[in-house]
Amino acid sequence: MGLPDSYTQKPNAIPSYFDAIQNAEPPQRFSIKFLENLEFKSTNDRTFISILKDLGFLDIDGVPTERYFRYLDKTESAKVLAEGIRDAFTDLFAVNKEAHKLTTDEVKNKLRTLYAGGKKDSAITSIAKTFSALCEIADFESQPFQKKITPPEEKTEIKDKHEDKKTKIDLDKKIKIEGLQYHINIVLPESRDQAVYDAIFKSLTEHLG
């Protein structure tokens, strides 16, 4: 399912969480200790780690991902967060591609259907509030991040080079095959019957031309 399990009981603290990690040295592993060093010492703050994992900012072991490091660029951070939200709530955006514009109550109603009884209503409410709080500091209007790919013209050129090479190889093979000379040694059986030899040579003539 393209929906998260994580949420926070402190949705109003979400902007502060993200401001803190943006202004801190990235850790080798985002642990509870690191979160406490950012002055978030409540047990309710710890769920933020799970949220970061669902958003693709941390891997399963809590190690910062490429998305985490791209978020540190303040000119790109809001757009990067939007990417993470889309990935975490894939099913919600499949139902409504502009889900980020929905009210919290509208999000909650959509999630009730999507979770299909898989979560308690209180949890769904918290997830909806978390989603809305995340969307408030995200930029969904800018172009989504795309990894650099080889332009079509470059691919065509590379393909053409391979085709030329292949043609040359085929031509070389053809030239070599045409230049081959075959030497066939025939061991004739001992026989006083001339008809035996006539039959052999006749057969050779028919098959070898």
Image (cartoon, helix red, strand yellow):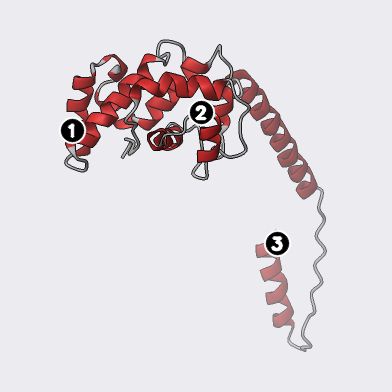
The percent position of residue 35, horizontal first and vertical second, equals: 51, 33
- Residue at image location 52% in from the left, 45% down from the top: 61
Image: 19 above or below 118: above
Q: Earlier in the sequence, mark 1 or mark 3?
A: 1
| Residue under numbered circle 2 | 39
| Residue under numbered circle 3 | 208
- Residue at image location 22% in from the left, 41% down from the top: 119
Numbered badge on residue 47: none
Quarter of the image for residue 81 reads top left
Q: Residues within 10 Å of mark 3 (few under 14, many from 20)?
A: few
* Residue 51 visible somewhere in the drawing: yes
The percent position of residue 54, horizontal first and vertical second, equals: 41, 35
* Cα–Cα span, label 2 and label 1: 34 Å
- Mark toward the viewer: 2 or 1: 2
The amino acid pointed to by label 2 is Glu
Q: Nearer the viewer, residue 118 or 93?
A: 118
- Residue at image location 76% in from the left, 88% down from the top: 191
Q: Residues within 10 Å of mark 1 (few under 14, many from 20)?
A: some
13 lies left or right of 206: left
The amino acid pointed to by label 1 is Arg
- Mark toward the viewer: 2 or 3: 2
| Residue under numbered circle 1 | 112
The percent position of residue 74, horizontal first and vertical second, equals: 56, 14
* Cα–Cα span, label 2 and label 3: 92 Å
Q: Classify mark 3: helix, strand or loop.
A: helix
* Cα–Cα span, label 1 and label 3: 81 Å
6 lies left or right of 209: left
Q: Earlier in the sequence, mark 2 or mark 1?
A: 2
198 lies left or right of 35: right
Q: Classify mark 1: helix, strand or loop.
A: helix
Quarter of the image for residue 94 reads top left
The percent position of residue 190, horizontal first and vertical second, equals: 79, 88
